Image (spheres, helix red, strand yellow):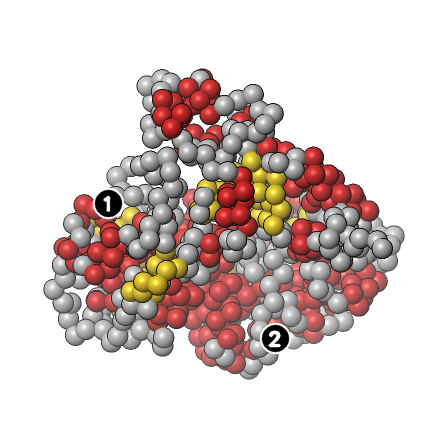
Amino acid sequence: MLQPSCSVCHQDETTNQCPLCERCIELAQEGNWAPELDFAVHEQMAQVLGGPIRSLKRRWENLEQFMLTTPDVDWARLRNPKEDPVRYSPFPEEEEELFIEKLNSGFGVSGYEKERLEDGYQMSNGSILSFSEGSMYVDGHRHNVQIPIRQFLLILTNKETRIGWDLVMIFLATSALYQPIRKSGEDGRYMNRYYNLFFRNNRNNRITPFDSMIQTSYVLSEHKRKLGLNPLADHHWARALLERLGSNRRPRQRMKLSKRFLRDGSNNILLDAEWLWARRWGKLNDLNEHKNVPSPIALSTKGELCFRAMTKKGSTRRAPIPPSPGLLAGLVSWCSSPHESREGEMLIATQMNWSSAYEIQEKLSPPFVKSMQFLRGVLDQFPNDTWVEGDRILVRGMIGHFYEIRLESGAHRAPFKIHGVRLGFTSPHSLCIHTGRYHRDIPIGDTIAIVVLSLISDIITAEKVNSLMMYIRSNEPQGEPQSTSRVTPKSFYSGSRGMLPDFMMFGGNQEFNKLLKPTELDDLQITSDTVFVNDWRIRPPSIRDSMFEHDDFEFGEIDFAQYNWGNRREEAQLVIVEDPPAEVEDVLENLEEEPVQELREGEGQFHRWYRTMPLVWEALSLQPIGNHVSVGGVRGVLRFQGCGLRVTIRTAQEEDAIIRFLEILGYHYSRRLNGDQVFVRRDFPIANPRQELRTLLEPLEQELGFFNIENYVIRFIEVGRPPDRMPEVDQRLHANLVDHY
């Protein structure tokens, strides 16, 4: 009788596929663009684009002709289809022809031509459209965002293609597809400089369809309001959503906002909206995010409007968008529509079928199968230094350090995370041993095999990877060295490898590890492989739950961890605590007696979210209606009107969390003062603030390595109605927690 084996790697004692191969198949599918998209949509858009043989020009022409047959372009048409939107050009006819030639050839603009552009074009509705210093002005009001000025001018100067189109509306809406915008009149003191320096490389500027819907609706309704043509209803909801969206929110926070918008039924206000794409959002009940599909519209480094599309190998390319008003009008509607709509699906299919007709990729392609067999061969080659449990791999380093490889999305979009492992403890922070971007062309099995080999030779790898070297120097080995290793713990820590490089030290080379001295290495108690591996195998498959092994002690109905925090110990042995640490119990029972100076201790995220952020929450909840706070942004200071607490906002995660605290507790944005955002408390807290707080903290499990969010939630006080006046507070809420750089 044949012994069952994995159909991929041929591992024995399994019936179909081993857990390792199953997880690798899932990760390989997650890396694809919108794998769940209906194949009929792919076939439709591949046919629309012109089939297998098509030039770039032909693709754009076919796509434009298709869009012109849909209602998605009607919003940008003039009532009279034969009307010229430009009533008066600032250029005489002959000069305009020369100007057009310069635009087509890419030559610069002369000083005389800049003066004419500043005078502007008089449009058919009476508006004046002008350009100055790279910015667009409508009736003298600056549209303070980046624009593809050359493409806009090519449309303005083309007397044939511009007929029947409202160009001002098209230009305004197009500019809202690829960048965050702000309400008119908002202080742009720092934003101009920010856009000029960091716009193209800042991840916070990635636009989702929800962002596009709000921004396009707002700029269009604002423009029509100024012309006296727009009902105030559309303008009010667009303005309100833009205020909630904020210009400083990270993409993940903006996605959360869109989900809440649909979950609580607020999208019903869009059912009667003027804009077609907004009404599509009003019909949704759920939101499906295609994380691997990039935002379709981008502005190149040359200021050219481009379309992001997929290449034959699955990477991203940018195709310049031709200056056509009908094409831009259709793209505005599609990009602002939800992915769940038919138009959203057609947009994604256009991206995926741009270079060639999309083909469903086989889950078990020959390169994938070979890579998994190669990985299994590497693991079989080192049976005494590698262990597999489900989709986790344990690797022993050269002098006895242990590492766990988890098959999940990691840094640089790599399909793995690496965590240091000790007896009874898995490090919450992953180790990055990747020096660049993950290459998706390499099969996943080959990638994991390279990682395994790198960790087996961790001492050699650490010479080029600082994070790995810091871990080895900071943590004593707990297992036996490899049988074939020529390096011992004593030789490593006492030799030149036990020194930090010059560029990481002040005052020259010094011994780094003061906790673990070379003279103490002989006294290390080494754990046997059997005990260590068995301890590792019984841990939960998710790292976020592995830290807390609960005992019978309960405090406030919350179980506390059996093991000490952190991986540094006063002794080389791991200290196992049968009862909760006394300092944790004391902090919870007598928080008001905690000295202020202790709040300044610790720079880790545990300290910030275990002590500092609960203080911020408490101070915000105790302020009465009418009191304000000022938020200084990242590296700025958070200040309170009712108490003396001052806190430096260290990261974008902290800033996003504080903004959400304010929303939960009834604060509303008021104004900007000296570059800070000022929020005033005007309402009661929202319903069930503790659940909202729990929802806010949950992503930190993945981002910051936190475990059991309930142990953090309990640190935040219960909130009720705001007090009539600010109560007297203890010394904790007058602490100065400002960082000094």
Residue at coordinates 14% horizontally, 67% vertically from top-left?
727
- Closer to the camera, 559 or 220? 559
- Closer to the camera, 130 or 552? 552
Furthest-left residue in this view: 728
Marks 1/2: CA–CA distance? 50 Å
Query: Residue 42's quadrant in the figure?
Result: bottom right
Residue at coordinates 73% horizontally, 45% vertically from top-left?
372
- Closer to the camera, 513 or 339? 513
- Position of residue 34 in the picture relative to residue 472 (left or right): right
Q: Secondary structure at mark 2?
A: helix
Q: Position of residue 160 (x, y in %)?
A: 73, 60
Q: Give the amino acid at mark 1.
A: Arg
Q: Nearer the viewer, mark 1 or mark 2?
A: 1
- Position of residue 372 in the picture relative to residue 688 (left or right): right
Q: Position of residue 662 (x, y in %)?
A: 33, 64
Q: Position of residue 174 (x, y in %)?
A: 59, 59
Residue at coordinates 54% horizontally, 39% vertically from top-left?
529
Query: Residue 349's quadrant in the figure?
Result: bottom right
Q: Position of residue 608 (x, y in %)?
A: 32, 51
Relative to 384, say whether 725 is above or below.
Answer: below
Q: Residues within 10 Å of mark 1 (few under 14, many from 20)?
A: some
Query: Residue 170's quadrant in the figure?
Result: bottom right
The residue under label 1 is: 600
Q: Give the amino acid at mark 2.
A: Arg
Residue 153 visible within the image: no
Relative to 250, say whether 670 is above or below.
Answer: below
Residue 485 visible within the image: yes
Q: Secondary structure at mark 1?
A: helix
The residue under label 2 is: 280
